[in-house]
Image (cartoon, grey):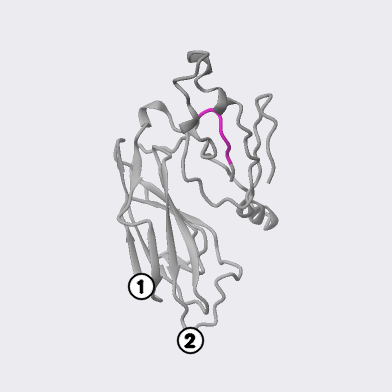
Amino acid sequence: MGFLDNSSITVDAILTKRGREILSEGGDLNIVKFALSDEEVDYTLYDVTHPNGTDSYGAVIENMSLLEATPNRTNFRSFLVDNPLSGAKVVLDSLNYTSVDTNANIALNPSTTGAPAEQYTFTIENTNIVRASGNASGKTQTADSLNLVAQSINVPATTTVTVTGVTSGISNVITVSVKADPASNTDPNQRQRGGGSTRTRTSGQSAQSGGAGGRGSY
């Protein structure tokens, strides 16, 4: 990890481990969406009492050293969004599922507050640990909701599921920890099968996101 030279405007874009994996298999990244984040910025440093006046309120923030993009990131915890989406968020019943038994079901029923109703793209980090019901090998699926099924694995393991609003581009991240199955021979860290995606779509929906500043990665 390093710091960017913030004396000029810099765009630092790299492939994540998942992106590199797709390229190594001869696949096409087919990037159709991106997310921007500024979560390394501490906005509590905005100083409305600065003696030099309003032009200096954000002086500390503007002179902070920005971190380089890293290939190890699997999600962002905060995002830059358009002004009309300020305060909007994707809400789920729980963001942390622990000690989940083999073949147990987890129902994900997201909703978006502060923005119009939408469908969601569910991205499973490791399909050896959990899979979408009825979609044995797909890592991504777009629908109103999703039912996850815990897989049989030989050691305890944890994965994430990223839920992203198709219209708003706002995301939330769920963590799922599955218990070991003594009868299993499946190593959760072995090569994952498939990687395709399925989509359940209603007419007239589109997916776009954008913004200015921050960092993006795939």
Question: Can you identify the residue that label 2 sits on?
Answer: 183
Which residue is outermost to the front?
Answer: 51
Residue ID at (67%, 58%): 25
- Residue 133 showing in the rendered view: no
Mark sitting on residue 61: none
Report x, y in % for residue 109. Answer: 30, 54
Magenta region, main secondary structure? loop
Three-letter code, disc 2: Ala
Report x, y in % for residue 69. Answer: 63, 42
Q: Give 145 or 3, whichever is nearer the viewer.
A: 3
Total tally of numbered discs in the picture: 2
Question: Can you identify the residue that label 1 sits on?
Answer: 104
Report x, y in % for residue 218. Answer: 59, 46
Q: Residues within 10 Å of mark 1 (few under 14, many from 20)?
A: few
Identify the mark nearer the N-term, 2 or 1.
Answer: 1
Q: Which residues are magenta?
A: 211-216
Three-letter code, disc 1: Ala
Residue ID at (44%, 59%): 175
